[in-house]
Amino acid sequence: MRNLLFYFLFLNTSLLLGQENFTPNKITDNQITLDGYLNEELWSSAAKVPFDIEFSPANNKPSRIKTHGYISYSKEYIYIGIDAKVDPKNIRVSVRQRDDMNMLNDDFIALRFDTFRDARNNIVLGVNALGSQLDARQINEISEDKRYDVSFNINFQSFGNITEDGYQIEMKIPFSEIEFPNGTDQIWHFNFYRRYFEDGNVIELSTQIRDRDNPCLVCQTTDIVKFNEITIKKRFELLPYLYSNISGSRSSNNQKILFNKPNGNVGIGLNLDINKNTSLEVTLNPDFSQVEADVTQIDANSSFSLRYPERRPFFNRGTDLVNFVSGTFYSRSIVNPVFASKLFSQFNKSRIFLLNAIDENSPYLVGGEDRSYEGFGGRSFVNILRYQYLINPKSRLGAFTTNRLYNGGGYGHSTGLDGLFLFSGNWRFNFEYTKSFTQEPEQDWIDSDAKIYGKTARLDGDNLDGYSLYMRLYRNTEHWRSYFYYRDISPQFRADVGFVVQNNRRWTTFFHEYINILNKPALQKFGFGTKIDRIFTFDAFYKAFSADFFTGFTTFGRTELKYTLDYDAVKTFLRRTYYHLQSHTFLLRGAPYEQLNFELEYTLGKELSVNEEVPEVGRIHKADMSINFQINDNFNITPLLRYSRLENLSKNENYFEGSILRLNFKYQFSNYLNIRLVAENNSFIDQFYIQPLIQWNPNPSTIFYLGANQNTIEEIDDITFSLFQFNRSQIFFKFQYLIGL
């Protein structure tokens, strides 16, 4: 009874107050030595913030272990201390490369800042028990995969150490790295988060209550911290780089690889703050080559171009503002810019984003009803302008325009409006309307005689107008998640700076799901739901009616089992109609031990062979498997397998069969230095490659890497090569250094 009374008083007091105020003490920078131990006298007088709420799996109950955050500051820096109590034997942690998402499997803490106090977004700084960093921008989204922009970077220092009764962390965060309103006196919203493990299960703590009925997570960062008489220091950074590579090839077994002359390149970038609300990035002759190759996707049964994630930091930073539902902007459509600039301004009620680039190799993508068509052109000028106005913390409106002008004639323009509105606690509505205006270049970039609603896919100078409309109505509570989604994409809608592969459809979706989170080891969470889709074309042709039914649960060791039935009652492709296609997908994933996490997915059922001249129904078998082995605090091995086979129902043969096997080996010497090896064998195209790489990355902008690509194509001009008879080779290095002035 006494515990029940304590809990009742604790919960109701927290709910009534909802917000706490903290005024940290001000220090000089020489009062603290950053080493990951809270042994300086100043921490005893710093603002003390208890992590006293467990919001998962318990629903806002008092925390079972002690954690305290400490806040202090100087004129130019924020200092954070963390004292996290736990049995050291139960700490899960490894040395991580910066922004390694595997840190989600570690014991770590996160600090959230809402510097404008308007729930537009949260700046999230995460540090694990050994000081490894993960930073992100958390935005107002429901789905987990869109909620965090992990490409967002802040240059801060962190140190962590295991102690006899847990671990301690120290952080030093420059005010100059954070966007906030002008003024030397600042009042921000903030809170702390902690993740730890008990019997293999995740326990989540916070310094504030987490309302499961409120779909807006960034709105729940409301504790107040005050910093007085700080120094407003503007960033002025130079990013010079040097890049060089040498490549070679051979065309016979007996020939040695013949290397070309080395290639070299130099360039420079500039980052500066015009004021605390406006930043400018400019880069001349940039090198945007990726350090690590993309994981290859299987396209053997795809009629549309495949989308790959953006890995280039320049195009990732700040682009959460242009992450449109319609795909109107896709940064990887800017392939090889010789110049690019990006302006970002954030004020009390508005945000502005402007990106310009001159692209030497312009991709051209034409979406269709059942297929997409692509090619590559020459130089083009690219422009994206985005404006967003904050009506209040729960409502916003925006406008945008994108432009691409091609050398030699032709253009693609789009303009649009969008909005987001939260109301009645757990309801939200958002919309996006885009109008496109296209004049095709008269070029031979696309070789196809296909027609799209009376117009050719070939680039012959057509003038085209199109539009897209997206509307979504959500309702989220602790146990129920529902949404109604309408998409209207006209036949001639194009996005020359985006990624739109299909059009000519009016698409309605209804989704409804039940979830129950239980505070029990054997059954932590379970749920079930359905999703129904109905699609028509603009000429009222019935494209599809499908229903998905799914259920799943989570048990010991964060092990999740999920089953999905995908039933297409009606499906048309190339104006041929097929009935009663169904598939079954089984998903198993978990992280039962510190040294192991895994994900296994298997699909079987019926699917169309879309790349046959006359599409037919076949039996599909697809398997995806990835396993992460953390051998010790530094060494990690991750095998990944993707397999796909489509069987002919009437003949004893396959339309296609193949697999992609990829192995990643990484040794992390420190938070900044690692060596890794990537090997991949693709049986669909009979190709094998390996990529050894050593990388030093002491901050988000300074990077040195030295690596090589070794490729084997198993057959060239009827000559067969064995697996390790590399016939293409490249050695490369890059050094980019951040100079702060």
Image: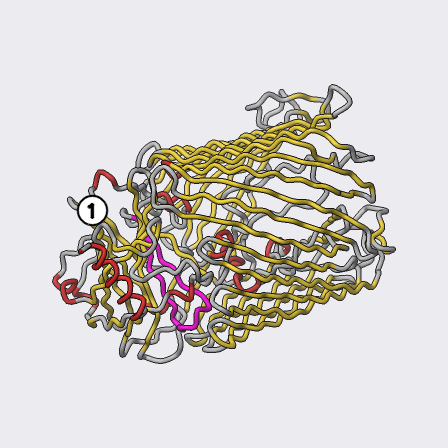
Q: Main secondary structure of the magenta part?
A: strand
Query: Which residue appears at 34% of the width and 54% of the height?
Result: 59
* Part of the protein shown in magenta: 109-128
Magenta span has 526? Answer: no
Q: Position of residue 331 (x, y in %)?
A: 59, 57
Q: Position of residue 434 (x, y in %)?
A: 68, 66
Query: Which residue appears at 82% of the width and 35% of the height?
Result: 613
Residue 102 position (above or below residue 259):
below
Q: In the image shown, does 716 or 459 lie closer to the viewer?
A: 459
Q: Position of residue 276 (x, y in %)?
A: 41, 75
**Where, by quadrant of the figure, is residue 621 drawn?**
top right
Residue 195 position (above or below residue 658):
below
Q: In the image shown, does 479 or 484 lie closer to the viewer?
A: 479
Secondary structure of the residue carrying tag 1 is strand
The image quadrant where one finds the C terminus is: bottom left
Let me know if residue 436 appears in the view.
Answer: yes
Q: In the image shown, does 170 or 268 lie closer to the viewer?
A: 170
Which residue is most to the left?
A: 41
**Where, by quadrant of the figure, is residue 381 drawn?**
bottom right
User: In the figure, is residue 162 to the left or right of 111?
Assistant: left
Q: How many marks?
A: 1
Q: In the image shown, does 360 or 20 lie closer to the viewer?
A: 20
Q: Position of residue 457 (x, y in %)?
A: 81, 52
Which residue is most to the right?
A: 454
The amino acid on which the numbered mark 1 sits, given as a three-letter code, is Gly
- Coloring scheme used: secondary structure
Query: Which residue appears at 44% of the width and 69% of the height?
Result: 119
